[in-house]
Amino acid sequence: MSATAPSVGPPRRTFATVRRKRVDRIGDPGLQILAGLASVVAVVVILLLAYKVFDGSSQAFNTFGLGFVTAEVWNPVTSQFGAASFIYGTVVSSFFAILLAAPLSIAIALYLTELAPKRIRRAVGTLVELLAAIPSVIIGLWGIIVMAPALENHIEPFLHSVLGWIPLFGGTPSPFGLLPAIFVLTIMATPIISAVTREVFETVPGDLKEAAYAMGATRWEMVRMVILPYSRSGIVGATILGLARALGEAIAVTQVIGSAVSIHASLFEPADTLASRVASQFQGAETTVQTSSLFYLSAILLVIALIVNVVARLIVRRGTPAGVMN
Amino acid sequence: MSATSDTPAPKLVGASSRRKRVNRLMEVLASLAAGVAVAVLALVVGTVLIKGISAINLDFLTETPAPFGVAGGGIADSIVGTLMLVLVASAIAVPIGLLIGIHASEFAPPRVSYAVRFALDILAGVPTIITGIFIFGLLVVAHGQSGYSGSIALAIVMLPIVARSAQEVLGLVPNSLREAAVALGIARWRMVIRIVVPSAASGLITGAVLGIARVAGETAPLLFTSSIVSNNVSWNPAQALASIPVTIFTLSESSSPADHTRAWGAALVLIVAVLILSVSARSLHERSRRKLRG
């Protein structure tokens, strides 16, 4: 900061100060314009992205119309394409992943804010956040080689024998399918949901908690009567953020889901999601209609992901004091 | 963060044993949940470590992939490619992100900076596979795959991370610093560059490192923009560059156990790099918070 201190005394119009003034005349508006341009770039990128994705899907849209969304077919030979089975795969895999991840994450956040001793809190908090940093392709690799065989040989037969009367657990166990995709997505959504939930829990005022204790509440009763009601909208927002993450994941899902065009009640059967179909087929697309249909799938995914994201952020921002989710 | 969360529940004289049992059960369940998360992390990282370490040796890091059916070979091309891709992506995203942060904290009226923040949040929510498709349509259709196309796709993934954290940390710089500088007669742009940015430096670096850690492991934006590669080490971003994540993805789809071994080796290299970046970003983050908040 010392470098910027001006000379003491009346300003002298030396050559240096004149040049400095001249540079400032360019520098001041220059930085403002550059900074403004950078902000414009951010807005332009998102608009251009949306335009390109919709533009790319125009051929498929003209050919199949809105019926594309409900058609359960993907046949490059006859050039018949539809999105229904991928929308089904996306919805089912994300829904069950969130069904597992949300309670798990809330419990983790409660442990970290209310139960854990200070030192353990830091360590476990760091570890959970590191889980978010593991690249999805590595979780997918682990999913294929380690988790899938375990699912096929132990967990799926067990689920089938105990809960086989539920259609979800009917069908024959297989290494590729919705179930491994659900577990992979659970692993990816949990760190996000627990991180946001934890921040929301930390904003619960201490005097509310003390009031509950003073009334003789046990710790769980305090959680149930103070923390959970106070952070309800924050928890919902965090869960939807996790959902957005699960909906858009392409790579790890492609690795474990088995790439099949079908709508099955069974979670053991191979399937595909919007994102994983685009990831696995785009490179090898043979006709312009097929490429355009993949753009159409991307457009559907983009619309779903954006709606879910915006809703999540609005809920979290409105339901919590400023600061969280900045 | 509140100190009160550490206060133990007061002793409950005469509370019904059922309430105590429910409380105990819930405490155990919450602890178990945290244990499960840590166990999964340990399981994934442990597997990568154990299976990867046997694949890694000097040749693996310095040689190019062996031709099909030949044993040995390494991932030197992917390591170099990932370095170049991340370098070019950072060269694009870090300056733009910093300028967006400066715009929000120094120039923009609140409504404009809210709109930019909204655009960045939306951009952060775009699935990365769609970013890849976008750059494919924008650049690859006309110019073919290249390291530059891949880097631009990565830069789009990186930009919201860098820009949002720049907005946040520059907003934390105390106004008294700015007022002191202006009172001394310094031009505004010098004030920004010499005083505001340096005093938030460690926070800005944290954002950049987090962004780098994120895109170093990204596969989807590169799948259609920089994936058709020869097996030679190339430093030239005008050609398509190999990358560690895409290599892991390709190898993991193969059915040969030798390919799987190589995938684990590449995964170990990637996970070590990403975890080092994330951990250093975290410690930087804590230091900058302490400095700015006093």
Image (spheres, helix red, strand yellow):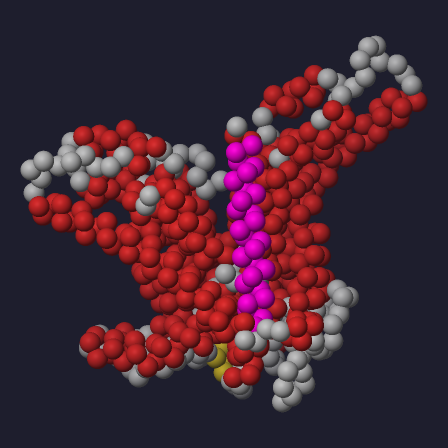
Image side of residue B216 versus residue A222, left or right: right
Q: Is residue A4 magenta?
A: no
Of residues A260 and B51, the one drawn nearer to the viewer in this rendering: B51
Of residues B1 and A199, the one drawn nearer to the viewer in this rendering: B1
Counting from the top left corner in percent of width and height, residue B181 is at: 69, 21
Q: In this picture, is A30 found above or below B76? A: above
**Residue drawn where x is 60% and y is 24% of the image:** B175
Q: Is residue B276 magenta?
A: yes
Image side of residue B223 versus residue A102, left or right: right
Counting from the top left corner in percent of width and height, residue B236 is at: 77, 66
Q: Which image quarter: residue A165?
A: bottom left
Q: In this picture, is A234 found above or below B250? A: above
**Residue drawn where x is 19% and y is 52% of the image:** B25
- Residue furthest to the bottom in view is B69
**Residue drawn where x is 56% and y is 48% of the image:** B281
Q: Can residue B237 be seen here?
A: yes
Image side of residue A264 versus residue B294, left or right: left
Q: Quadrant of the N terminus of chain B?
A: top left
**Residue drawn where x is 66% and y is 58% of the image:** B86
Q: Can residue B160 be seen here?
A: no
- Residue furthest to the right in view is A15
Q: Which image quarter: residue A116?
A: top left
Counting from the top left corner in percent of width and height, residue B177 is at: 63, 23
Q: In this picture, is A110 found above or below B67? A: above
Image side of residue B271 versus residue A95, left or right: right
In the rendered structure, which segment of residues is drawn in magenta? Answer: B263-291
Of residues B92 and B201, the one drawn nearer to the viewer in this rendering: B201
Counting from the top left corner in percent of width and height, residue A79 is at: 53, 82
Q: Main secondary structure of the magenta part?
A: helix
